[in-house]
Image (cartoon, rainbow, N blue to C red):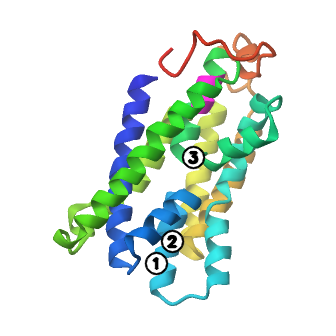
Amino acid sequence: MIVDALGMVVSASAFGLVYGLAARQGGLSIVEMLAMSVFVLAGAAQFAAIGLITQGVPWLAILLLTALLNARHLLYSAALAPWLAGRRRLQRAAMAHVLTDEAFGLALPLFQRIGRADVPGYWLAASLIVLPWMAMNVVGYVGGQGIPDPARLGLDVVFPAAMAGIAVGLVTGRRELTAAVVGAAVAVGVGVVLEPAVGIVAGGLLGPLAGLLVPARAAGDAGAAAAGSADQPSPHGDDPQVGLAG
């Protein structure tokens, strides 16, 4: 898990650097940039918002388009909800605010592996993403004047590469593989024909549905029957001996 976390830290840092560069080029002040990272905390939506702001798009349209782009977090929340059902509403709300793609990619496999929700492990995973992200926002913004065109360095591929890495980490059987392949195909196809934001939502909805159509036993998921109990939340609460590095 530590190796996975380090990979996520690297991707979040690189992505945060690119966002800082984009915010500077988009005309945002450093305070506005950091405020967006604190209150929105959704890299893809923040990038989209900067692009729409520079185009002079009305704020209501920006709100709707970025909400559509970020709709995948509804699926993340639905996947984590059974594990956190016994937690206080305020605690769940705070955890939801820091629910990024990377935090989800670390937390869900951890919960499944130990058979219960590990709240301290979740917060550690979120911190390993959020803190480097914001630090590199500042580095990218302050050092942005020395990089006139970030695309020339290939930094524009950081987000797709990070998402691909998260998907690979979450694929544990044929159901997940089917969901990933169908979701990616739909997202790319719809994104080319319509809009990338629409493609992401369509892929995020249709991919999991396609995965659910694959029967677990017929698909030959390794250890599906034996691991059944590990895929459900445990009623025993947190064990302080097991954490992110377990």
- Is 206 a magenta residue? no
Which range is magenta?
107-111
243 to 213, vertically: above or below: above
Instruction: Residue at 42% x, 24% y: name it.
Output: 2
Can you identify the residue that label 3 sits on? 181
Quick one: label 1, few (<14), some, or many (20+) residues within 10 Å?
some
Give how far apart the Cα atoms at labels 2 and 3 are.
Answer: 24 Å
- Is 108 a magenta residue? yes
Q: Amino acid at mark 1?
A: Gly
Q: Are the residues flagged by discs 1 and 2 in contact, CB closer than 8 Å?
A: yes
Quick one: label 2, few (<14), some, or many (20+) residues within 10 Å?
some
Q: Residue 139, percent across and down? A: 28, 58
The residue lying furthest to the front in this view is 31
Q: Amino acid at mark 2?
A: Ala
- Residue 238 seen in this snapshot: yes
Can you identify the residue that label 1 sits on? 51
Label ID, residue 48: 2
Give how far apart the Cα atoms at labels 1 and 2 are.
Answer: 5 Å
158 to 176, vertically: above or below: below
